[in-house]
């Protein structure tokens, strides 16, 4: 799953939001373009802080040198599988790359809900991972960390796991100061003071004890001169629900203190922002290894951590998906070379899939994947054609391929006779690979690998005469150049009827700084061919073509002269000797072609047939178009379509593929 590195960004400042940025039509959206505060304070550059040997009239402002720092907050670890700690370890890796001043948590550090032995094992695992942080970290107690569960309730310790928590993690509530800011940790699972029941679903069990209130009051008084005060608690009690309304007593104290900037919580396993309320940001984190549905990742259902940047009078908040931080020092030239080898490694598919008119079939293919890199890769090949008329067994293969090795993957494709009478897509497979570097797997972007097709399409000579209809917008036929080759002499001809002549219009072309083609721009016929890198053009001196009229155009080059014929009559000649400069672009019918092989400058009307011959077929002032060409390179009768394909009657099997839904119409 691809995700934005910064899921949520804002400079959270008081008192009012800054003006929105100016609209830029090249961006196309306003997501994350907002600022939640004024621009950073800057100072004028002075010689002791700025130096250059250049003369420029631009005065670059410098950042203010006042203290600023950052810390990171982790979400819940618990409620998920045991290997969720691997996600926590990834978060630690990310954090060490970012190097904040310290890390805070919001509780539910371990799965818990167990006896003392299981609790101790999970505690040691969690602490062993967190202790890999280069910076200090601070715990918050959650229900998973405190609630005891065991078959013999008589063995339940007093206070459940509170004593073990304070022995191995830290106090249930505490505070510390850093750079003129105070950080207060509260405890939200003290339980029902009358019954002792511990639950987060009943308001009676979600009240803060007088003892903790007394401490909080004293702590807020102690921190009265701090620039910022931050609170951390497991349960987001301000949401109400089963928490009741006890939080209102807390919020009033925070409001009256006047310097509380934000409160952070977890538990609900999805991100949520509630604020600012009375100038206080209320932030709930999702998970950092805990149970995560992933229902809507971009809306906060994901593993992440928050980065908080603290400045005088403001804080900035950003949520980062776990594992998305790249280590600059890992991206070496050698790594780039190796992953590019994996990305560009060809996939060999044999044999081509035979496709015949009105016949079903079953065909086994073997896909060979080679790992050209210096380390192992993982590979998953899966049938990836949406709505495909082909059945594939199995639907996927996966394997680990060692450096320099190759592996074969076998699939069986089946289809029925109706396939070639309707619209279908060429079967293709998805290739997902990962380069297994030391300690990290680099994901290679998914590739689509089409299955080579062996078209055995026979022309149905019993069909009535037809023509292909083009809408002048997005419809065209494309013939890959690997199916045919012109080396010297050439005849390109086409019968057509145009609905309109407007602007530059390609009829049959493969011209892009090379190649050859026929154009009918503004009703003026033209044949061009590239010789030795320069175009030779023969064209009518004026618009001669008529709309709603069948015309035949033929462009001829015999090695010495280019000729253009309209309806059998010679229009123009131009003499020049030279070597044909061809290209790998497809031959486009019904449009011109651009450098990417795409159709542009479309034709509007009907095309009856298209032919390409490696000979100069016509000479003299008047000729009759040949009806049969046994040695033609391309012979498109355009009487029928089979799926998106229009059969070629020549030995080249240069079948044309339609884009935009070209249809066949019966003509006289």
Image (tube, helix red, strand yellow):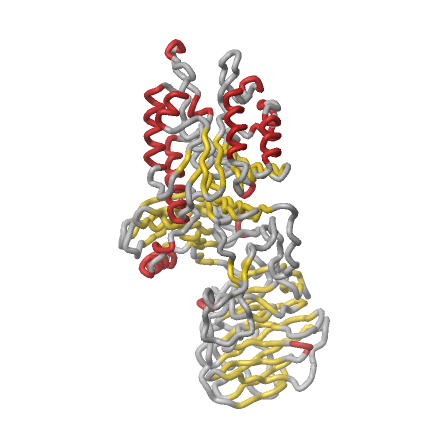
Tell me residue 562's x, y (percent): 54, 85
Image mark count:
0
Q: Quadrant of the C terminus?
A: bottom right
From what the image shows, is residue 430 above or below residue 631? above
Tell me residue 328's x, y (percent): 38, 55
Q: Nearer the viewer, residue 668 or 40?
A: 40
Q: Residue at x 40, y 24 (%)?
A: 112
From what the image shows, is residue 107 above or below residue 490? above
Tell me residue 173's x, y (percent): 46, 28
Q: Residue at x 58, y 23 (%)?
A: 243
Tell me residue 236's x, y (percent): 55, 30
Q: Nearer the viewer, residue 250 or 94?
A: 250
Query: As drawn, is 472 to the left or to the right of 401?
Result: right
Query: As drawn, is 372 to the left or to the right of 248?
Result: left
The answer to whether residue 465 is visible is no
Q: Nearer the viewer, residue 576 or 513?
A: 513
The answer to whether residue 473 is visible is yes
Q: Residue furthest top?
A: 154
From what the image shows, is residue 544 above or below residue 293? below
């Amino acid at each position: 799953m691809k995700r934005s590195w910064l899921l949520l960004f804002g400079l959270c400042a008081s008192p009012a939001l800054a003006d929105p940025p100016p609209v830029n039509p090249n961006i196309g959206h306003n997501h994350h373009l907002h600022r939640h505060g004024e621009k950073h304070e800057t100072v004028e550059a002075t010689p002791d802080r700025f130096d250059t040997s250049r003369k420029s009239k631009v005065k670059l402002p410098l950042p203010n040198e006042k203290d600023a720092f950052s810390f990171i907050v982790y979400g819940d670890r618990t409620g998920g599988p045991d290997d969720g700690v691997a996600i926590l370890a990834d978060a630690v890796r990310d954090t060490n790359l970012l190097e904040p001043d310290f890390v805070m948590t919001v509780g539910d550090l371990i799965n818990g809900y167990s006896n003392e032995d299981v609790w101790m094992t999970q505690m040691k695992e969690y602490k062993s991972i967190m202790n890999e942080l280069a910076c200090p970290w601070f715990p918050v107690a959650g229900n998973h960390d405190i609630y005891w569960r065991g078959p013999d309730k008589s063995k339940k310790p007093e206070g459940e796991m509170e004593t073990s928590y304070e022995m191995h993690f830290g106090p249930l509530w505490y505070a510390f100061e850093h750079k003129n800011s105070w950080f207060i940790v509260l405890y939200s699972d003290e339980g029902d003071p009358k019954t002792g029941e511990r639950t987060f679903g009943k308001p009676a069990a979600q009240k803060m004890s007088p003892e903790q209130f007394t401490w909080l009051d004293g702590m807020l008084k102690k921190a009265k001169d701090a620039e910022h005060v931050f609170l951390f608690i497991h349960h987001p009690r301000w949401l109400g629900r089963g928490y009741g309304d006890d939080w209102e007593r807390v919020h009033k104290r925070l409001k009256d203190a006047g310097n509380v900037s934000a409160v952070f919580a977890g538990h609900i396993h999805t991100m949520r922002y509630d604020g600012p309320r009375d100038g206080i940001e209320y932030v709930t984190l999702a998970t950092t290894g805990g149970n995560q549905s992933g229902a809507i990742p971009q809306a906060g259902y994901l593993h992440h951590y928050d980065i908080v940047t603290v400045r005088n009078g403001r804080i900035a908040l950003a949520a980062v998906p776990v594992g998305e931080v790249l280590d600059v020092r890992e991206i070496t030239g050698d790594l780039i070379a190796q992953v590019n080898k994996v990305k560009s490694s060809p996939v060999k598919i044999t044999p081509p899939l035979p496709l015949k008119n009105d016949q079903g079939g079953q065909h086994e293919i073997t896909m060979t994947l080679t790992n050209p890199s210096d380390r192992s890769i993982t590979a998953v090949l899966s049938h990836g054609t949406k709505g495909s008329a082909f059945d594939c067994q199995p639907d996927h293969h996966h394997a680990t391929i060692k450096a320099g090795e190759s592996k074969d993957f076998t699939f069986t494709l089946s289809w029925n006779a109706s396939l070639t009478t309707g619209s279908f897509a060429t079967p293709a497979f998805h290739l997902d690979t990962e380069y297994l570097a030391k300690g990290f797997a680099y994901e290679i972007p998914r590739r689509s690998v089409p299955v080579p097709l062996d078209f055995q399409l026979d022309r149905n000579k019993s069909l009535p005469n037809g023509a292909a209809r083009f809408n002048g917008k997005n419809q065209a036929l494309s013939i890959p150049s690997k199916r045919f080759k012109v080396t010297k002499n050439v005849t390109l001809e086409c019968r057509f009827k145009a609905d309109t002549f407007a602007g530059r219009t390609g009829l049959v072309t493969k011209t892009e700084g090379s190649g050859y083609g026929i154009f009918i721009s503004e009703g003026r016929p033209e044949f061009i061919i590239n010789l030795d890198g320069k175009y030779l053009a023969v064209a009518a001196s004026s618009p001669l073509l008529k709309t709603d009229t069948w015309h035949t155009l033929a462009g001829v080059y015999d090695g010495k002269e280019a000729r253009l014929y309209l309806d059998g009559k010679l229009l123009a000649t131009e003499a020049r000797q030279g070597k044909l400069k061809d290209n790998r672009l497809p031959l486009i019918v019904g449009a011109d072609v651009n450098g990417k092989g795409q159709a542009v400058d479309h034709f509007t009307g009907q095309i009856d047939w298209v032919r390409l011959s490696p000979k100069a077929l016509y000479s003299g002032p008047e000729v009759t178009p040949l009806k049969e060409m046994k040695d033609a390179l391309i012979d498109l009768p355009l009487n029928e379509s089979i799926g998106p394909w229009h059969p070629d009657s020549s030995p080249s099997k240069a079948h044309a593929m339609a884009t935009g839904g070209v249809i066949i119409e019966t003509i006289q």
